[in-house]
Amino acid sequence: MKRFLKSINIPELIRPLGQLVFFSLGTTIVLSAIVLVFALILDRTVVGQTLFERLNVSLFTYTLINLPQVAIDGLTIGFVYAAIALGYTMVYGVLEFINFAHSEIFAVGAFVGVEILIALDRFGILAGASLVMAYVYLILAIVGGMLAAGGLAVAVERVAYRPLRHASRLVPLISAIGVSFLLQDAIRLVESLTTGQFNRIFPTFGNFDRRVILGKMALGTTNITLGVSIKSIIVIVSAVLMLVALNYLVNATKVGKAIRAVAQDHPTASLMGIDVNRIISLTFLVGGMLGGAAGVLYALKFTRIDAFVGFFPGLKAFTAAVLGGIGNMTGALLGGIVLGMLETYAGSYMGVFTMGAAGTEYKDIFAFSILILVLIFRPQGLMGANVAQKA
Amino acid sequence: MALLETTNVVKKFGGLIAVNRVSFQLDAGRIISIIGPNGAGKTTFFNTLTGIYHPEEGRIIFNGKSLHKLRPDQIASRGISRTFQNIRLFGNMSVIENILVGMHVHLKQSPIDTLFHLPFFKKEEKESERKALELMTYVGLKGVGNELARNLPYGGQRRLEIARALAAAPLMLLLDEPAAGMNPQETEDIIRLFRRIRDEKGITILLIEHDMRVVMNISEWICVMDHGEKIAEGTPQEIRSDSRVIEAYLGRGAVAGQHEEKIA
Amino acid sequence: MIPHFFKDIITRLEQGIYPHIIILAHMVLGTALVYTSPRSNLAFLVLITSFFTLYYFKTDRRFKLIVGAVLTLFIFPVVGVRNIFYLEVIFQISVFAALALGLNIVVGFAGLLDLGYVAFYAVGAYLWAFFGSQQFYVLPFAPGTQPSNLPFLLPGDAFYLFMFIAILIAAITGILLGTPVLRLRGDYLAIVTLGFGEVIRVLANNLDKPLNFTNGPQGITPIQRPTMPLAAVDGFNALFGGLVGHDVSPADMYNVMFYLLALGVIIVIVFVTRRLDDSKIGRAWTAIREDETAAIAMGVPLVRMKLAAFAVGASFAGVMGVLLAGSRTFISPESFSFMQSIGVLSMVILGGSGSIPGVILGAATVTILNLQVLQGLSLYLSQLRQSDAVIPIINFAWANLSNQLDPAKYQRLLFGLILILMMIFRPEGLIPSQRRKRELAHDEDDNGK
Ligand SMILES: Nc1ncnc2c1ncn2[C@@H]1O[C@H](COP(=O)(O)OP(=O)(O)OP(=O)(O)O)[C@@H](O)[C@H]1O
Ligand SMILES: [Mg+2]
């Protein structure tokens, strides 16, 4: 036992935790400051007046009241993005290839998890479950989603990417787009043959919908309660656990070393006795499992899923990966958190700040704009090194 | 006046300084070689000259004008043309089309000429096709105009790359290991070709080469690089007996083994 | 022995007068079949594949042109007005062929994977939808709240003018979108273009406020068509009335007209593509596709040439957009989804990127699979459901099959399969592109010595 404890590389467990806390707090503070400044400025304009007439609070107060909720929502979705983004970034690291089908791997994970719970629900197991068992079932669903998604990712790589490994860059990308489309309809096909329903709802059970009250705060005439839904806590905690585990796998184990070696250089890695194909499969497995878990967590948070549920989270997670510096795992964490926060802040405040001319409906475009701006001005991302193309 | 003059050119990749304060002059009409062990920074130096990389420091003056911040295509139209260490032809285009792409900067046809096949278009196409065929003969490629470039044998591909570079009618030709992988007969032929290009067309030639038979045979001046720095330059005789050069090659263990015998 | 024997026959058939006979026979057979059984999908397939025979067998150009013209200008319209479903299939094939040919310039020639190609299609469609409808006067009204008696902004005949304006506007959009991103590496560019496609769709969905430009998700309707000269209807009836068997209404005549317009656009695209391909511009595109670094080192200005490809491709999508808006008289953001972009891409990939006949074949195949095979399956399934047939071994009654299983809605499966299978087994497509063989007179002389 002592031996085992000794063999654990404690710094590698603490480092990512520190990073996560740092990234989350940093982003929250910066973004909150920005919206508050905006609110202060706009308070004096017609925007502030309109709001005052409507709700009888100043724009600044309104902004402040909503901040904690917005920050927590942003953090929750940010961690989901980070978990998906890791799948993109790991595959990119070893193959320099955008796994376009990763969004559907995510969707399959979500479906398998939700179907497991629905099945349990149908047998009446969920309804009467104790709190502990509720968590057991949730974990069961997450593990189920992980296994299905991981296995699928490995299979997809074998069938649709491996034969194309030496073709030009766009060929496997086109194949991946094909896989993405194929999987979307495959999900629909399976659903239509089995349940006949394309929209699946995450069953209500356990205490996941409850809110934990953190405190009350008086702000002028209004009393606001600070609360977090248990769902959000679950999402954040599980994402953090997975991210720490993944970091440990990659940075402190032998397998991780092999992954990093393959990412550096395939021929050299195979000269050193590493089975490159196996490591690539493993990368897809790990990335797929993370995506699958993220899928179930996403379903928990947003309740309703359909076959196309992966598209936007996938694209945004890809954006997050690019934002952080594709190929860089810490970058994916940072990118996911920043993007989730940015998007939530923008979605929550843009409508008020522009008096309804542009609001949440432009949230999805917002991520694209970030992608384009990053690619144009800092293609190596926030944390990536500048790598020029070889001539 | 020198045709090409570089002053303290520096190119880094992250922490690695691939080209370190290289100053270098090249007079018009000469044949000059750059040699040095693997990874010395020779190709990277070529890439900074042709604008594929922008140097972090230093100046490059070509034909009296600075090449600072110019794109590769702009540099090509200033009169620098090149070949690549690992052949980079347009594999799925025919041999003649490869050469025609080389002429790109000189073709004046407008989209209107092109769409309506106006007389100017036809004349220019015919003329450039004629020149391309001439160039094929010049480098020793015959009867393969419609062949796809990737179907040529290795030696033919090397020649085609040279023809494509010549098609741009450059002032200076940069050749990156043009004789690599050639047998002695082919090597001799290609040396003769380089002489002719210089003598008949007056094109200045700067080449990177590992094969010392080629280097010593053809160069009028040799510049030696190691670890990104220029460690020596001089006539072939001087370089042959320069202790630093010998050290650079011999002090390199296994990798240098192959050069050892060539330099002797 | 036997393969030899067949080879002999085929070689013989490819020579002399035989190709002409085969082509004509195929065409006549197809026409006769469709004529006698105007509802049969098979008969229609026989007719439409006569194009393939026409392409495959070598005959002189004039013969090909004449047969092609007879097929497209005479047989298809007549067959089409006899069965309006065929006309729809033919029209859609021509629309998608035009789109695929436009995308082919970007993907096939310049090697830029554009995943948001329908954005330009949408630009053209909304252009005419806005100016060719009442939308201008609806600007101040939220969707659904406008008064009913608003005038139209422009007369329907402005449609023709807008086909040209759309070329310009779509090309400008292409340049505006392309300029910042075309220096990106290929795979990033693909994702960014996908983003552009989505941006345009989201804009179409949401630009119903503060001013109502697009009428949001409901879309814009009615959109005007150009006036149909009565003479055209009368003329058609006088000429072909006997063959058709009934008098053609102006409404049907519109479909014929839009089909012919689409055909015209295709001819222009093919012409432009071929001329450009065989010039400095086309060679630069191919060079970029083959090796960007080598191309730029040879003096090809990358960004400018890529922009040109983007703009040319975009402009064709723009024209087709106007055509779509005019022919459907209704458009909504739904028609311009990511799936449409991938659909067009799968046509290019299936046929052979960079190959004009290939891309047309790809467009025809995918459209037919979509409209006839998938929908045919749907029909067949719903018949099975109504019957009391049972799947033998597993003893499953068709009637119990979920109503949600509707093959017609599985286009993504189709596109996905096409993309994957083609990439793995035949990345160059069904009819790979070929470099033009030049007649190099004195090159051959040298060879002969
Ligand atoms: N794009 C790049 N990114 C990072 N490092 C690079 C890049 N290109 C070259 N290098 C590094 O720069 C150094 C110089 O490389 P370069 O190719 O210029 O050497 P060279 O003298 O041409 O060698 P060789 O004789 O093998 O061709 C090497 O250490 C190489 O690994
Ligand atoms: Mg080199």
Image (cartoon, rainbow, N blue to C red):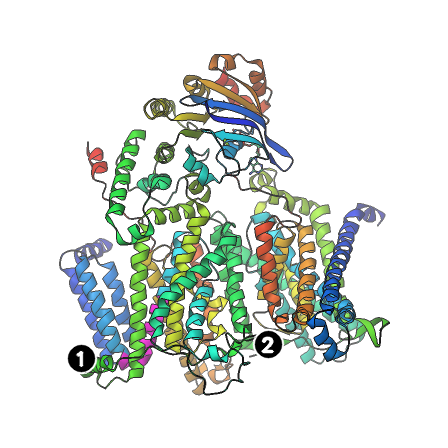
Q: Position of residue C106 (x, y in %)?
A: 41, 56
Most distant residue in the left direction = C17
Q: Is residue A249 left or right of residue B100?
A: right
Q: Nearer the viewer, residue C152 or C446?
A: C152
The residue at the point 72 percent across, 72 percent down is A48
In the image shown, does B165 or B251 lie closer to the viewer? B165
* Prevailing secondary structure class for the magenta stretch in the rendered image: helix
What range of the chain is rendered magenta? C81-97
Q: Is residue C348 magenta?
A: no
The chain letter for the residue carrying disc 2 is A
Per the image, is C87 magenta? yes
Residue C220 visible, this angle: no
Residue at numbered disc 2: A199
- Discs 1, 2: same chain: no
Q: What crowding class fits label 2: few (fewer than 14 Cα within 10 Å), some (14-19), or many (20 or more)?
A: some
Q: Chain of mark 1?
A: C
Check disc 1 and report its element: helix, strand or loop: helix
Q: Which of these two is toward me, C131 or A101?
A: C131
Which label is found at residue C239?
1
Counting from the top left corner in percent of width and height, residue C397 is at 48, 83
In the image, what residue occupies the spot 19% across and 56% down?
A: C14
Residue A102 in sight in this render:
yes
Q: Nearer the viewer, mark 1 or mark 2?
A: 1
Q: In the drawing, does residue A109 fall left or right of residue A53?
A: left
The amino acid at mark 1 is Leu
